[in-house]
Image (cartoon, helix red, strand yellow):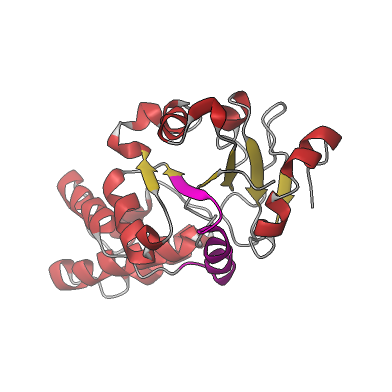
Amino acid sequence: MLPQCIVFDLDDTLYLERDYVRSGFRAVGEWAESALGVPDFADRAWRLFETGMRGSTFQTVLAECGKNPEPDTVAHMVNIYRCHSPAIELLPDAVHCLSELKCKASLAIVTDGPAECQKAKCASLGLRDFFDIIVCTGDWGEEFYKPHRRAFEFIQNQFGGADCRFAYVADNPVKDFHAPIALGWDTVRVRRPGGLHFAKEGLKGFTAQTEIPNLWNFAELSTSFAGLRASGERTL
């Protein structure tokens, strides 16, 4: 039996987050070229990202280019990155999956991150065409990011609580599944090649029931959640 409400994560579940990062670097790079005279800022930032750098990319690139990474300059770059209109698209398997499900179940999103970023992503991806509710936990503050329960309890209250069957579909095994498992939801990890959390392993007691590489066959898989729970099977 198909869950009555299927809730999706956003980043690396429905599109590749690395595409958003590259889009943001391009937006910052355009500003850096016109305002600072740095013509290759985006390429430099992307090379650092590909080596695994996170968190200090703008400061590092500015220093490499002989520019003083002043706090106001970096803050302006971060604002451009967060508020730009991203050049991203739903992955083909996500489009197929959501098209299959939208007339069969209620659909929602729970996503972490600065609210302006996540809302810009949702707008660029056209998610209002598929989803009944989109919860950006950044609207409440970082203390309510996953693994906090607030977003999941909010979804339950919106869709009928204990009378409704829920599933959460996400990619990050470190934080995504704590709350839905505690609330008795079905859980599915999408472990995409190219996803930023692809190599991470789940934490004991908080591992998704099922692991899949993409969403092509998710509609068919979701009808067997109850059997998977009973058998203890976790990977398809």
Is residue 103 on the magenta stretch?
yes
Does 150 appear above or below 189? above
Which residue is depicted at the point 66% across and 53% down? 191
Which residue is depicted at the point 38% across and 46% down? 133
Does 104 appear above or below 158? below
Q: Nearer the viewer, residue 203 or 31?
A: 203
Which residue is depicted at the point 67% across and 49% down? 199
Q: Among all residues in the image, which is located at the extreme right?
A: 231
Residue 61 seen: no
Position of 146 with respect to 38 (left or right) is: right
Q: Nearer the viewer, residue 114 or 8?
A: 8
Position of 28 with respect to 171 (left or right) is: left
Q: Which residues are magenta?
A: 90-109
Residue 173 seen: yes
Q: Quadrant of residue 150?
A: top left
Q: Quadrant of residue 174?
A: top right
Which residue is depicted at the point 40% across and 66% down? 22
Position of 59 with respect to 130 (left or right) is: left
Position of 204 with respect to 50 (left or right) is: right
What percent of the width, then of the height, locates residue 107?
A: 48, 49
Is residue 113 on the magenta stretch?
no
What percent of the width, then of the height, locates residue 23?
A: 36, 67
Q: How many marks?
A: 0
What percent of the width, then of the height, locates residue 130?
A: 43, 59
What percent of the width, then of the height, locates residue 227?
A: 80, 40
